[in-house]
Image (cartoon, rainbow, N blue to C red):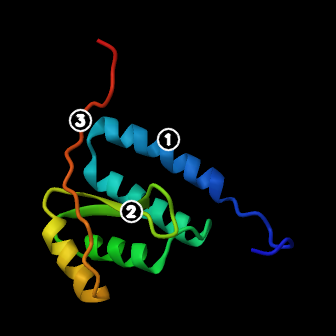
Amino acid sequence: MSDTQPISPAPCAVQGVDVDAAETLATGDAARMGELMNASHASLRDDFEVSSEALDVMVECARATAGCHGARMTVAGFGGCAVALAKVLARTAGDAYRQATGNQPQVYVCTANDGAGIA
């Protein structure tokens, strides 16, 4: 980015996605949540330029897998991690990524829960 490049409206767009995501998670609408994840990845990649080719390939491999509602980069950019919302995905997406890049990804299967709380 140059000093003369106009500031992108992306921060406002991302904030809106966050609010929509919280509301969508509360309703359990996986398809809509996937759309929001996809939009978030596009913004991080295009507006903030914090993705990488490796992350973009992993996100595309996940999205191409049957049963994936959406995928995006997460944590730190520039080679961080990707997260996908799916019932079954890990082995297929990992295999597709290995075929596309020649690199073996570390794939972790996680289950959402209510998180931390006070008893």
Q: Quadrant of the N terminus?
A: bottom right
Q: Of callouts 3 and 2, which one flags the residue occurring earlier in the amino acid sequence?
A: 2
Q: Amino acid at mark 2?
A: Cys
Q: Point out the frontmost of discs 2 and 1.
A: 2
Task: Farthest residue to the top: give it.
Answer: 119
**In the picture shown, does residue 58 fall above or below 73?**
below
Task: Farthest residue to the right: give it.
Answer: 4
Q: Point out the frontmost of discs 1 and 3.
A: 3
Q: Nearer the viewer, residue 98 or 32?
A: 98
Cα gap from disc 3 to disc 2, whole angstroms: 20 Å
Residue 19: mark: 1
Cα gap from disc 1 to disc 3, whole angstroms: 19 Å
Q: In terms of secondary structure, where does tag 1 sit?
A: helix
Q: Amino acid at mark 3?
A: Asn
Q: Quadrant of residue 107?
A: bottom left
Label 2 CA crowd tier, 10 Å (few <14, some 14–19, many 20+): some
Residue 113: mark: 3
Q: Are marks 3 and 2 in contact (CB under 8 Å)?
A: no
Q: Amino acid at mark 1?
A: Val
Q: Is residue 37 left or right of residue 19?
A: left
Cα gap from disc 2 to disc 1, whole angstroms: 22 Å
Residue 104 placement (x, y as % from top left): 25, 77
Residue 81: mark: 2
Residue 5 placement (x, y as % from top left): 81, 73
Q: Residue at x 38, y 62 (%)?
A: 81
Q: Residue at x 21, y 73 (%)?
A: 93
Q: In terms of secondary structure, where does tag 2 sit?
A: strand
Q: Of callouts 2 and 1, which one flags the residue occurring earlier in the amino acid sequence?
A: 1
